[in-house]
Image (cartoon, helix red, strand yellow):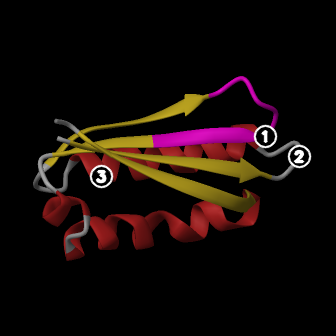
């Protein structure tokens, strides 16, 4: 299993709007073949929202269909987004 953890820094006062868009993205990612789980999480840090997905393989995570799911939702996230970091974990 591959876990993709994307920590997003969002603009002040935009948490509700960003979370709505992130949940829509997670719902679309769950429909991608090879996606085992997708969810939206708060870290306790101000203006930080995490989108975490679990994948059967790196190939599924990097598939064209996964990319299309992101692009479908990008416009709804972008107005509230400042920066992000991504961490990839692979089960052993």
Residue 20 colored magenta?
A: no
Q: Secondary structure at mark 3?
A: helix
The residue nearer to you, when weighing 46 against 65, is 46
Check contact, mark 2 vs mark 1: CB within 8 A: yes
Q: Residue at x 20, y 37 (%)?
A: 91
Gap in angstroms between the C-alphas marked 3 and 2: 26 Å
Q: Is residue 8 left or right of residue 53?
A: right
Gap in angstroms between the C-alphas marked 2 and 1: 6 Å
User: Which quadrant is home to the N terminus?
Assistant: top left
User: Which quadrant is home to the C terminus?
Assistant: top left
The residues colored magenta run 43-51
Q: Secondary structure at mark 2?
A: loop
Q: Is residue 46 left or right of residue 24?
A: right
Disc 3 target residue: 29
| Closer to the eye: label 3 or 1 | 1
Disc 2 target residue: 12
Q: Residue 68, how many percent across, how many down? A: 31, 73
Q: Give the number of the disc on residue 47.
A: 1
- Mark sitting earlier along the chain (3/2): 2
């Amino acid at each position: 299993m591959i876990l993709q953890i994307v920590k997003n820094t969002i603009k002040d006062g935009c948490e509700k709007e960003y979370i709505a868009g992130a949940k829509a993205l997670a719902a679309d990612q769950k429909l991608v073949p090879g996606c085992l789980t997708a969810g939206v999480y708060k870290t306790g840090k101000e203006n930080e929202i995490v989108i975490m997905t679990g994948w059967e393989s790196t190939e599924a995570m990097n598939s064209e269909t996964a990319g299309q799911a992101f692009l479908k939702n990008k416009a709804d996230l972008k107005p509230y987004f400042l920066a992000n970091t991504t961490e990839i974990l692979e089960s052993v």
